[in-house]
Amino acid sequence: MQKVNNIPERLFLTRLSESYKCRAGDNVLLECYVRCQRIKSIAWYANGEPVDVRGVRIWHRYDPATGHCMLCIRSVLDCDSGSYHCEATSRDNVVETLEVKLTTDDRDKVWKKIPILNMAGRVMPGGAKKLMTSCPT
């Protein structure tokens, strides 16, 4: 891992909110940016399960030229509430994970749909497997 003034340089460039609340039926776009020149691979996880690049309702994309990572959820369902993780692996095999907690809330009937969530989450060292083992069950 590269260091600046003896401080390890993070893989993720964004440090934003840890949670997001939406309504069932909303379309959600989770975005983050990584230091693209250092990244070997990007993976997204929904409640601990890998998200397919070619999913129908939930999918992800990564642009290695810009470092732009995104997870798309079309028409959020109540069962989509949970943890979403973007896992970045560097060329020197350092793994860092960005986590977002998504919850659905349909109690506020006057709430307008918010179709896009931009750049939310918190960065954690280690991969999703390490994160899952540290979560109480």
Image (cartoon, rainbow, N blue to C red):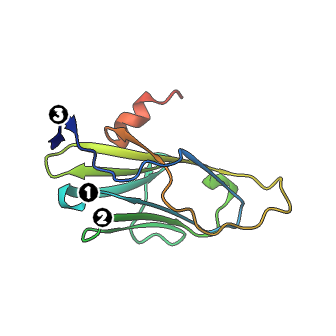
Give the number of the mark in front: 3 or 1.
3
Q: Is residue 124 visible?
A: yes
Is the C-beta separation of discs 2 and 1 under 8 Å?
Answer: yes
The residue that disc 1 covers is 35
Q: In the rendering, at what x and y percent does residue 92 appear?
A: 13, 46
Classify the position of the N terminus by image quarter.
top left
| In the depicted structure, whether residue 106 falls above or below residue 67 | above
Q: Going from the N terminus, do you reach mark 2 or mark 1 first? A: 1
Name the element at disc 1. Answer: loop
Q: Quick one: which residue is furthest to the front in this view?
A: 5
The residue that disc 2 covers is 67
Q: Is residue 1 visible?
A: no
Query: In the image, what residue type sits under mark 3?
Result: Asn
The residue that disc 3 covers is 6
Between the residue at mark 3 and the residue at mark 1, the CA separation in whole angstroms equals 18 Å
Instruction: Name the residue located 79 percent from the left edge and 62 percent from the top edge.
Output: 111
Is the C-beta separation of discs 3 and 1 under 8 Å?
Answer: no
Compared across the picture, whether 48 is left or right of 93 comes to: right
Q: In the rendering, at what x and y percent does residue 101 appear?
A: 56, 46
Query: In the image, what residue type sits under mark 1?
Result: Arg
Compared across the picture, whether 96 is left or right of 15 comes to: left
Q: Going from the N terminus, do you reach mark 3 or mark 1 first? A: 3
Between the residue at mark 2 and the residue at mark 3, the CA separation in whole angstroms equals 24 Å
Disc 2 residue crowd, few under 14, some 14–19, many 20+, Cα 10 Å: many
| In the depicted structure, whether residue 125 falls above or below residue 82 | above
